[in-house]
Image (tube, rainbow, N blue to C red):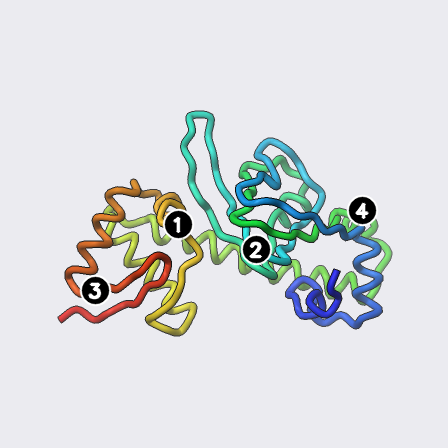
Amino acid sequence: MDINVLEKSRLFQGMTAKELSLCLDSLDAREKKYRKEELILHAGDSTDKIGMVLSGSVTIESNDVWGNRTVLSHVGINQYFAETYSLLGKVLLVDVRANEDCRILFCNIKTLLDDCKKSSPWKEKLLKNILIISSQKNLVLSGRSFHTSSKSCRGRLLSYLNAIALQTGSKEFDIPFNRQQLADYLNLERTNMSKELSHMKDEGLIEYRKSHFKLLKAD
């Protein structure tokens, strides 16, 4: 486990090396490896651990009994998942799947509530960081609702691509999804979405190759 990497992460931000060591011991931090497409957490199960992506990436998915899949979010390096479920002790309503080969650090943050009477500097910093992480995740989820509010395929694509441009500060960027994942995320049929992307390209609105996009001004 690379302490230097963890010191720079949002979860442990502001901690000294000694505080971080105490924190990791108290949270029973453990690293696990997963192969691409492997299920990390399954809907219907419960967890008392928050997951931090050390390498690779994962997707948060909603899969129903009829085989319908919706990609809710993409979780990359130094990002987190399951923090709300682990703190509240609720049953997972989503699946967490390895988007590629990845390494995950699991920390039992439920112990923070079980032993909340005993205060320490690292606990205060950790709770503050978890609050910030949860707030950021809420923005991501509300963003997806905003993108899918449009009734048209083009409207959803334009909303999503414009948001990524604003977040990256550039009109040229890479998105974290492949075509199927993007269709699932925007709740679109992949074939129709691909056709609409082609139309937008022909009209001079965008350029793209795989997951790399460039937004253009219409004539």
Could you tell me which residue is drawn at 77 percent across and 52 percent down?
Answer: 29
**Amino acid at pointer 4:** Asp
Q: Nearer the viewer, mark 4 or mark 2?
A: 2
Q: What is the quadrant of residue 215 in the picture?
A: bottom left
Structural distance between the alpha carbons of marks 4 and 1: 34 Å
Mark 3 → mark 2, Cα distance in angstroms: 31 Å
User: Quick one: SS at disc 2?
Assistant: loop
Q: Between 63 and 141, which is closer to the camera in this rendering?
A: 63
| Camera-side mark, 3 or 2 | 2
In the displayed structure, does residue 127 sit left or right of residue 158?
A: right
The amino acid sitting under disc 3 is Leu
Q: Sequence order check: which comes first, mark 4 or mark 2?
A: 2
Side (left or right) of 59 relative to 175 = right
Query: Residue tagged by mark 3?
Result: 205
From this viewpoint, which residue is outermost toward the top? 66
Question: In the rendered structure, which disc, 3 or 2, sits on the residue that comes first in sequence?
Answer: 2
The picture places residue 24, in percent across and down from the top left corner, at 79, 58
Residue pointed to by mark 4? 114
Of residue 69 and residue 156, the one placed in the foreground of this image is 69
